Image: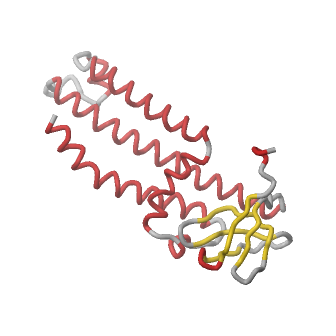
Amino acid sequence: MTTNLDKIQNLLPLGYLYLIILGIVKESLYYYQLDINILKYSSIMDILISPIADLTSEPIILIAVIFMIALSILLQFLLSRNSHKKWVQKFIGQKDSEKVLSKEEIKATISRVFVVFCMTALSSFFFGLGIGNGMKMVKKIKTNKLTYNHKISFDSDKTEEVCLFDNNSSYYFYLTKGNKNIKIAPVGSIKSVELINNKKLK
């Protein structure tokens, strides 16, 4: 039990670093298509929670990731349970001429394989999300098919109906009607944000 806890504690910094890298690349892929260097407008915390925010934004995304992780755990369990069988040993890349691994060594190898698999799958998923969402946003701007469902009130008492497509702890990113230029406003300059035309409340 203590050994497992030690392993988890050792992996936590790597997991934290992985989340940061995942968030940086995903956000950069999205905002690059909008010609914005998002790192200039984001804190480390914004980048870190970006993948988590994406997971909770749409139920289908959360379900897909949970399914993928559950499938990985199930496959790892099945392989570990059948670690003595030849097809499992071939799966992990052990050749017949090589030294036969013990059950514990095979389980450790399987664990490493599936950690790499999960990291690769999550990276592909979020990088694809960044590219896909960026392309979708660019297309909406070019074809003027944006939904203006937010009303922003500024400190100057000016009010605008906008398409608010993103925000973080420091900035709001939005477009106004009839203007394809993206506007970036500091949080401190905005008095309130009102959600209008909320379909779920109709």
197 left or right, relative to 114: right
Residue 174, percent from left and from top = 71, 68
At 54% across and 64% down in the image, what residue appears? 28
Closer to the camera in the image, 79 or 183: 183
Closer to the camera in the image, 13 or 117: 13
Q: What is the quadrant of residue 82 in the picture?
A: top left
Name the residue furthest right: 178
Q: How is the image coloured?
A: secondary structure
68 left or right, relative to 117: right
At 30% across and 22% down in the image, what residue appears? 88
Residue 19, percent from left and from top = 41, 54
Residue 120, percent from left and from top = 43, 44
Q: What is the quadrant of residue 13 in the picture?
A: bottom left
Count of numbered circles on the image:
0
Residue 122, percent from left and from top = 46, 45
As displayed, is residue 177 above or below residue 23?
below
Quadrant occupied by the C terminus: top right
As displayed, is residue 78 above or below residue 63?
above
Closer to the camera in the image, 66 or 82: 66
At 61% across and 38% down in the image, what residue appears? 60
At 28% across and 38% down in the image, what residue appears? 112
As displayed, is residue 54 above or below residue 150?
above
147 left or right, relative to 131: right
Closer to the camera in the image, 130 or 9: 9
Q: What is the quadrant of residue 94 in the picture?
A: top left
Quadrant occupied by the N terminus: top left
